[in-house]
Amino acid sequence: MTQHKTSSTILRQQQVVRVKSEKGSVSFLKLTPAMLLFMAIAFQLFIRISILEHGYEIAKVREQALNNDTNLREARGDYAALARPQRLYARASTELGFKPSHPSFVRVVNDQS
């Protein structure tokens, strides 16, 4: 009878182990979709944050490009205004009070270089 009891006890222990292992795998299978959903949401959040950061960088670069373009246009305008001899003469006479010099007032300094 002890032998029969022992074999039935072993059999019951094996059944308990099987039931426990099946329950563990079932709970893991139930958690797997939730974990996959969480990972998908986390990945989507990461992508959206990356897109926002790149959008801010693009806006910053565009603003810098517009500032550089404005500075270039102003420099070209100043150069065009100053490069014409008539404009230089007009600005020198009106703003600085220069008058045209007579050739007799011009002296040549010896250049010994």
Image (cartoon, grey):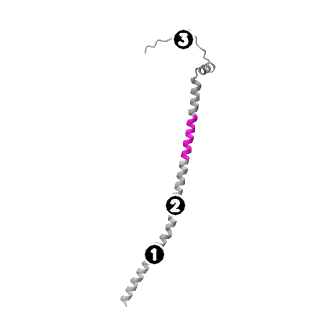
Dividing the image into 4 quarters, which one contains the N terminus?
bottom left
In the rendered image, which quarter is residue 3 located in?
Answer: bottom left
Q: What's the CA distance linking mark 3 and mark 2?
A: 84 Å
Q: Nearer the viewer, residue 68 or 94?
A: 68
**Image vertical order of residue 90 relative to residue 110, above or below:** below
User: Is 74 positioned to the left or the right of 14 in the image?
Assistant: right
Residue occupied by mark 3: 106
Residue occupied by mark 1: 22
Magenta range: 56-70
Helix or strand or loop: what does disc 3 sit on? loop
Helix or strand or loop: what does disc 2 sit on? helix
Q: Report if the CB atoms under discs 3 and 2 are less than 8 Å apart.
A: no
* Identity of the residue drawn at 45% across and 75% down: 22
What secondary structure predominates along the stretch shown in magenta?
A: helix
* Identity of the residue drawn at 48% across and 73% down: 26
Name the amino acid, label 1.
Answer: Glu
